Image: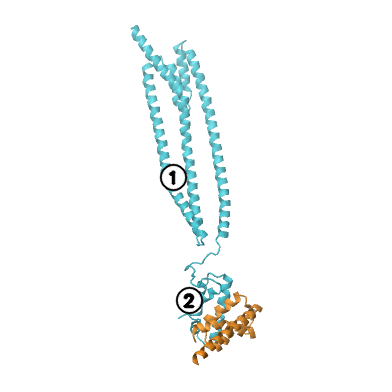
Chain colours: A cyan, B orange
């Protein structure tokens, strides 16, 4: 029922608590004994039977090493004698990798930040240039306006001929408005109102989009936060188990990787939030910059109303 | 024979067998089996224990047939231990015999 191989295999399994060399020493001796018995005319089976009950045999062998005879190695699993060197190696490697990865990511973000800054500077430069130009045109128009309507019309034409800078379209029109005020007063008031309404709606839409995007990001981030916390908890439990000698090095490293992944994804997500927050800040800036213009429009509207009142009085 | 009797005296028989000349496992089992009926499952673990306790030392020697054999050699500590065991055995069996004789008479 039992041959030499299966006997030796079972014996080795039961002696797995011993050092490999010691196991081999014992197994070689027993194998040789069986061989000699077989050479002496016995069957393998009978030779093995003479070793008696394998439980008792194992217990006696282990007691020779002062190992508790009732000790049984976890079935199907080899005990890892000392997991720490492997863990140290693994963490050292992982540490090096993450350091390299981190510096790589930091370098990438640094570059991105640099390009964004350069863009912003260039944009501001262009905006500043065009604004200066329009401001100059405006002051010129104001200077000319009292003199003749024709010159105002000329300036108007000149202003309209200038191809409006895409981002500055509203500003451009608003800048031109003071010139038009005397000719199309009611029309300007209505236009200003609608423009303000449109601007407000646009700001509202932008704010809503910003809020929706950030909420969406938050929603996306929540599962990762949960997973990360879970991974950290598992990592703690696994480390405790590892110190007790369970062969869980691989699972622990997986957990560590999962936690690191979650942190990395959250980091990337926070980068996205930051990207969205910048346009919002810029919008706030333009609103602030645009305020003098709207104030100007409001003033002109009030002036127009006053003029209307005086005209009515005159009539 | 009573397993408990055997167990107690087996160490002495094994030590005494190896004292005369170095032996390998199979030989030793055959030698001991002449005195007491005992199986390999008892002898080999005993040899391992006595080796771990430095009463035996082992070496490999080539054999004409098959792989090299592991020979057991009695150390000085082994000799002292054997002598102590023999003295204990003598005293023990004398006491038991005396008691049995007294009971009989």
Q: Residue beneath label 1, please?
A: A221
Q: Nearer the viewer, residue A128 or A277?
A: A277
Secondary structure at badge 2 equals: helix
Q: Quadrant of residue A302?
A: top left
Residue shown at 44% from the left, 47% from the top: A225
Q: Is residue A88 above or below residue A22?
A: above
Of callouts 2 and 1, which one flags the residue occurring earlier in the amino acid sequence? 2
The chain letter under disc 2 is A
Residue shown at 42% from the left, 42% from the top: A218
Image x and y of residue A44, in percent: 50, 83
The chain letter under disc 1 is A
Secondary structure at badge 1 equals: helix
Residue A55 disc label: 2
Count numbered badges in the picture.
2
Query: Do pointers 2 and 1 mark residues of a single chain?
Result: yes
Q: Nearer the viewer, residue A299 or B1?
A: B1
Image x and y of residue B94, in percent: 56, 87
Point out the frontmost of discs 2 and 1: 2
Q: Nearer the viewer, residue A45 or B6?
A: B6
Image x and y of residue A152, in percent: 46, 15
Task: Identify the residue at the far right of this view.
Answer: B76
Residue B68 disc label: none
Image x and y of residue B89, in percent: 57, 84
Category of crowding for the residue at label 1, using alpha-carbon neighbours closer than 10 angstroms: few (below 14), some (14–19), many (at least 20):
some
Q: Is residue A261 visible?
A: yes
Task: Identify the residue at the far bottom of this view.
Answer: B105
């Amino acid at each position: 029922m039992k041959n030499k191989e299966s006997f030796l295999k079972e014996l080795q399994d039961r002696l797995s608590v011993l050092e490999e060399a010691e196991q081999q020493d014992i197994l070689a001796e027993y194998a040789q004994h069986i061989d000699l018995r077989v050479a002496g005319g016995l069957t393998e089976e009978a030779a093995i039977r003479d070793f008696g009950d394998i439980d008792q045999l194992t217990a006696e062998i282990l007691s020779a090493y002062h190992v508790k005879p009732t000790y049984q190695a976890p079935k199907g699993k080899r005990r890892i004698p000392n997991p720490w060197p492997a863990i140290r190696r693994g963490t050292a490697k992982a540490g090096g990798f993450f350091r390299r990865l981190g510096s790589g990511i930091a370098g990438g973000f640094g570059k991105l930040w640099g390009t964004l800054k350069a863009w912003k500077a260039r944009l501001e430069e262009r905006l500043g240039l065009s604004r200066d130009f329009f401001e100059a045109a405006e002051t010129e128009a104001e200077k000319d306006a009292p003199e003749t309507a024709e010159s105002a019309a000329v300036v108007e034409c000149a202003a309209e001929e200038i191809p409006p800078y895409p981002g500055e379209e509203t500003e451009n029109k608003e800048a031109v408005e003071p010139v038009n005020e005397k000719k199309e007063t009611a029309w300007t008031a209505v236009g200003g109102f609608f423009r303000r309404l449109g601007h407000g709606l646009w700001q509202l839409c932008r704010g809503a989009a910003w809020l929706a995007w950030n909420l969406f990001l938050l929603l996306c981030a929540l599962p990762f936060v949960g997973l990360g916390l879970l991974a950290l908890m598992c990592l703690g439990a696994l480390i405790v188990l590892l110190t007790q000698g369970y062969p869980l090095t691989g699972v622990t490293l997986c957990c560590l990787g999962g936690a690191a992944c979650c942190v990395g994804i959250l980091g990337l997500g926070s980068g996205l939030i930051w990207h969205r927050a910048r346009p919002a800040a810029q919008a706030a800036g333009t609103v602030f910059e645009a305020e003098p213009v709207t104030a100007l429009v409001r003033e002109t509207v009030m002036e127009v109303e006053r003029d209307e009142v005086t005209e009515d009085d005159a009539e | 024979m009573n397993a408990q009797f055997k167990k107690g005296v087996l160490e002495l028989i094994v030590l005494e067998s190896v004292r005369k000349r170095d032996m390998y496992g199979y030989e030793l089992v055959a030698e001991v089996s002449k005195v007491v009926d005992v199986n390999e499952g008892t002898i080999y673990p005993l040899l391992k224990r006595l080796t771990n306790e430095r009463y035996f030392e082992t070496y490999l020697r080539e054999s004409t047939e098959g792989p090299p054999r592991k020979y057991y050699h009695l150390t000085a500590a082994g000799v002292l231990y054997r002598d102590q065991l023999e003295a204990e055995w003598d005293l023990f069996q004398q006491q038991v015999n005396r008691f049995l004789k007294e009971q009989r008479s």
